[in-house]
Image (cartoon, rainbow, N blue to C red):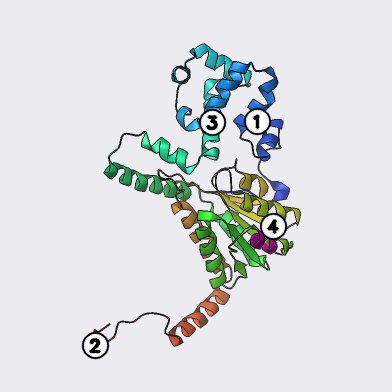
Amino acid sequence: MEIKSARSSRTLPALTSSSRKAASGHTALEARFARSQAHLSTSRKHLLRLILENPEDTFFLSSRELAKRYRVDAATIVRTIQALGYGKFGEFVADLRAHFITRITPYALLKAASRQKRSLHDRIQNSLDVDLRNLQSLRSTLNAERIIVLSRLVKRARRIVVVGIDLAASLSWHLSYGLMSLGFAAEGPVGGTGNIQKRVRALTSKDLLIAISYKQGLRETVEAALRAQKQGVPTFGITDSEDTPIARICDYVAITPVNSVSFANSYVAPMALLGTILVACAHTRTARTLALLRRSEEEDRADHRWYWAPTNGKN
């Protein structure tokens, strides 16, 4: 997990021509292709379009295998990637893999996984293994000091809006509910674009927007972060790569893996990250947190919130 610093001291390099293209929604490979189109022959354009449109079929291939896949000779592959400005085939493959990860769809992910010769039992075990690797990756890169910085930012915020759409709504709800339980004015708005835009439009520099989205990012979440940025609202993103729109837009960002062998992202690592955030927030004002939880416990007891089995053993 990695958290970048605020806008005034961002760790990302200055935008080059290629990264400016990427910031507008293009991957680095797409940006190179767009820049080089005027100098490419029709056959090379066609070849590159095929590769870009089917990265799940090609990012793991050698230059010779890639040539065989598209029925050209290996020299043609080498000359084509050189025309894009790559010095080595490995550099091209790295960008192709990044393109695949950013543009991957549930269909493409399951299609790639289906090519692996595994039994159903092995696929189930492999899913757990991938989840475990994601969690181990988070643990090995977690910077506790950065989580403390985030908790202080949460503490200062007058209002906190957590935006997560589609499957990420589960993360948004979990984080906003946890923050509310700790006494913070947090919400995870649901519904259509209008509902989210209204919430974000009301935010000021005294508030905080947390945007959760992965890979190329869902439009509503990215646009919420962009709107908040224009309004001077501090923004914090949770995503899986520095190349995602959320990472490029937000002042602060936590990067956690969501690798999966399923058609959906794995939220094992993101949920663990949310746990560390809530722990840090709870202990930035421990006395107030204890008072809130004590009152909540007393109310739950009085309202008979929890189920207790009858003493006579009958339901």
Instruction: Give how far across and how far down residue 229 sits, in percent.
Output: 72, 53
Q: Nearer the viewer, mark 1 or mark 3?
A: 3
Which residue is rendered at x = 67% and y = 51% of the image?
223
State which quarter of the image contains the C terminus: bottom left
Asked whether 86 falls inside the magenta stretch, the response is: no
Which residue is rendered at x = 47% and y = 57% of the image?
271
Which residues lie in the magenta part?
A: 194-199
Q: Is residue 87 visible?
A: no
Q: Is residue 295 visible?
A: yes
Of the two numbered discs 1 and 4 on the same chain, state the one appearing first in sequence: 1
Please report contact status of discs 1 and 4: CB closer than 8 Å, yes or no. Answer: no
Q: Which mark is residue 312?
A: 2
Which residue is tagged 3? 53
Of the two numbered discs 1 and 3 on the same chain, state the one appearing first in sequence: 1
Instruction: Give how far across and how far down residue 180 sits, in percent.
Output: 56, 71
Which residue is tagged 4? 234
Q: Residues within 10 Å of mark 4 (few under 14, many from 20)?
A: many
Which residue is tagged 1? 31
